[in-house]
Amino acid sequence: MSPARTDRGRTAHAWTWTYEGYDPERERLREALCTLGNGYFATRGAASETSEGPSHCPGTYAAGCYNRLTSSVAGRQVENEDMVNLPNWLPLRYRVRVEGARPGPWLSPDGPELIEHGQTLDLRHGTLTRRSVYTAREGGGRRLRVEQRRLVHMGEPHLAAQRTSFTAEGWTGEVEVEAALDGDVRNAGVDRYADLANLHLTRWRTGTATGSGTGTGSVTGTRTGTGSATGFERSDTVWLCCRTLNSHIRIALAARTRVVGRRGTTSRPGTPSRPGITPRTHLTARQAVQALTIPVESGETVVVDKTVALYTSHDPAISGPLTAAIEAVRRAPDFPRLLASHHRAWEHIWRRAALDVPGEAGVILRLHLFHVLQTLSPHTADLDVGVPARGLHGEAYRGHVFWDELFVLPYLNLHFPEVSRALLRYRYRRLPAACRAARDAGRAGAMYPWQSGSDGREESQELHLNPRSGRWLPDHSRLQHHVGSAVAYNVWQYAQASGDTRFLYGEGAETLIQIARFWADAAVWDPSLERYRVRGVVGPDEYHDGYPDSPAPGLDDNAYTNVTAAWVLTRALELSRALPPSRGQELFERLRLDPAEPDRWDDIAHRLHVPYHDGVISQFDGYADLAELDWDRYRGQYGDIRRLDRILEAEGDSVNRYKASKQADVLMLGHLFPPRELAGLFRQLGHRLDDESWRATIDYYLPRTSHGSTLSALVSAWVLARARRDEAWAYAEEALIGDVADIQGGTTAEGIHLGAMAGTLDFVQRCLTGLEARDDGLWLDPAPLPQLSKFRVGVRYRDHWDVDLRIRAQRVRVGVPEAAEGPVRVVLGDSESAVAPGTSRWLDLPRGRVSRARARRRR
């Protein structure tokens, strides 16, 4: 993997991700990639010494915490719902006072005093360590060495902490420290949203706490105080509470700051702090600040610990967020014990997410897995949240839930099925909203929104800004109704992997059947074609949202939409027949399902129109009539043309006129369905799709795709791994480095791309192994790439918690844990085996697969 394609200054080892030096231009990117979280909340890896600015975007986000604001856009009032940036718990600034001198400036990486800087993300233990060295402006060899270790606790989801050590070199004096809770924050993490309303918090209050109670010296948000809180000068705990402006979610943080030790040439680490060093508390309307003055001698290190608790009114089993936060901080152990329990929690997580891939690709995959688990951890199973497309790492896409779960749940199904189930229940709870949306559109069933947030209504923009032209343009992305098929696919895949028939026959069946009813109602019979058609939609491509010069948005018969709709209708029919009689009767009566509906599903599932041209599947009806784009001209003129739509619009043109796609569209079918199943779907629809015609389709669309989405390279790698493996690695590599190298030029700084990260994990787990979890066992069809020909994954299949798969160029090893409740049936090619608990078995790849691999190596 080329170092030139990754962030300069970055080094990686098996379990660490390190940046050496301070680079203001890359700081926001590093903040996103050094985010720490636990599935309940996450905090970007921002410097504690600085506030929001051109190089910094501190952010703390709690899963499912949204608020709605109205903005004036292009003369219209536009309402947007955002995942809220919560009060910042990180602030901890410092300066030094040398004996006999006035205090120096507040130190930060942006100041001229910085001479060394680095930070290391420890993936195994879930910590971020930042190291800085500052020198006095006047020289003289005086230095302050600062090291800070930070955690967001994986075991105790409401706790976070940071330990900061200060070492004096060549001077004696004092270190002045100010630790704060800062409620004066906005959603300012995406520059193109700068002109939109972004103040989501209101009714701030601050105070101090002693023992288990709250102090009375609070300051409301209606006035500003600047003095210390009378009677609480010796308290080590402060709190801040507020609420969201319109969703009325109450938020509370409490922070305990203590000088816990000093060490030097004549003292041991952990020596009790000098007496009398008690924080002085300053409260304002939106900030609670604790100030300490700590004597220090040359060669001595002093340590300050800050422990924080965060609660919201969404949390169960609390009397109130503020009381819960103060009690949590009061009970929290010291930093070493917090760190130890945090390490144990991560150890348990890693056991369930076993992934061992050699080389730099393996390190990046581990980073991807780390961020997936920080967004969607076992704690997520207790929450009513979906899959935020940018994780809990930033504010792009406003924290909304798209179809990215389509790329995330297949990985989670085989490791954390309880998390997958919770994410599917998020969709089920919003099924009534999807049914209302369908009724409002004149349709039956459920029409899920392209962008979802708190309550399941459509959150997609009606306008979007083209930064190149500065124009606000109509946004028709809400016509991507294929999101419903993605929800149905996830329901089915979860049930196949987990064996959870209780969910499948309950919430799953209701969800899938309502989505099928939508497709059945959307399909219109065309007597001239003797086929059903689905009109006025937008496919995964996203570039094409209408026909050239047509005043009406939408396209007809998007192939991906129609084929997946046929799959949904088939699964709904199969499931409706498989339901236990009592459950089926109850569900059909409640849904008022007409007895004739299943027959209509079956008819449509066999007669939906799939357009073709030039011997390949058409992306949509009329695609053949579009003009060819001069790709060489645009690449030569603009270089990066991933956002070709913006380039053409700024030129006064439209991408709707050209055979040019933002991302894989038709090829997405090869990502969702194994070759056997995809061929069967097309056969069901009256078409023959063999290896030759599928390869021709791949050859047609790849050179006509700009890969403007991080998901596009992933999908391309997936289909090529099965069709032309020699070409797959280039796309796999791009999918791997998409975020770490920020290949889209600034988007990762606004939040990682969770679907792409999880998708690379699933690429190894299912694509390269050919793994399918079915009712009757595990089916394998390995297709390792030369660059990824040796790896290990551990998966959970039904009640078998840790089935071990080891892939080699010519063999597969399957190991079943001793605690398993029986043998696992494994099908590989034309052979099948039963691997008993406590045993493992090496299986040879089919001869054809081995000979093809050898031929590739000879070439």
Image (cartoon, grey):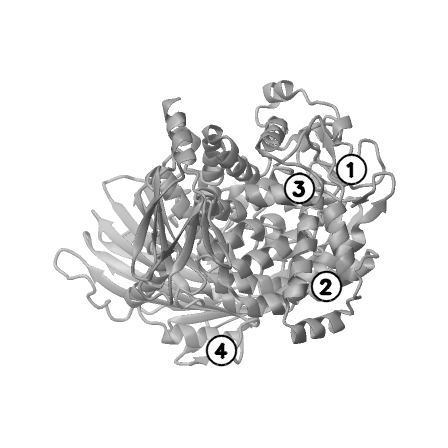
Residue 3 in the image: above or below residue 356: above
Q: Which label's residue is closer to the chain start, 1 or 3?
A: 1
Q: Can the viewer see residue 177 in this picture?
A: no
| Residue at point 32%, 71% (across, down) | 333
Q: Are marks 1 and 2 in contact (CB under 8 Å)?
A: no
Give the label, 3 or 2, closer to the camera. Answer: 3
Q: In the rendered image, which quarter contains the C terminus?
A: top left
Q: CA distance from mark 1 to mark 4?
A: 54 Å
The percent coordinates of residue 97 (x first, y second) are: 30, 53
The percent coordinates of residue 94 (x first, y second) are: 36, 54
| Residue at point 54%, 49% (across, down) | 407
| Residue at point 59%, 48% (across, down) | 396
Label placed on residue 546: 1
Identify residue type, mark 4: Thr
In the image, is 146 to the left or to the right of 443? left
In the image, is 444 to the left or to the right of 568? right
Q: Which label's residue is closer to the chain start, 3 or 2?
A: 2
Q: Which residue is mark 4?
A: 323
- The kind of secondary structure element at disc 3 is helix
Label placed on residue 433: 2
Label placed on residue 682: 3
Give the label, 1 or 4, closer to the camera. Answer: 1
Identify residue type, mark 2: Ala
Identify residue type, mark 3: Phe
Neighbor class of circle 3 (other Cα within 10 Å; few <14, some 14-19, many 20+) is some
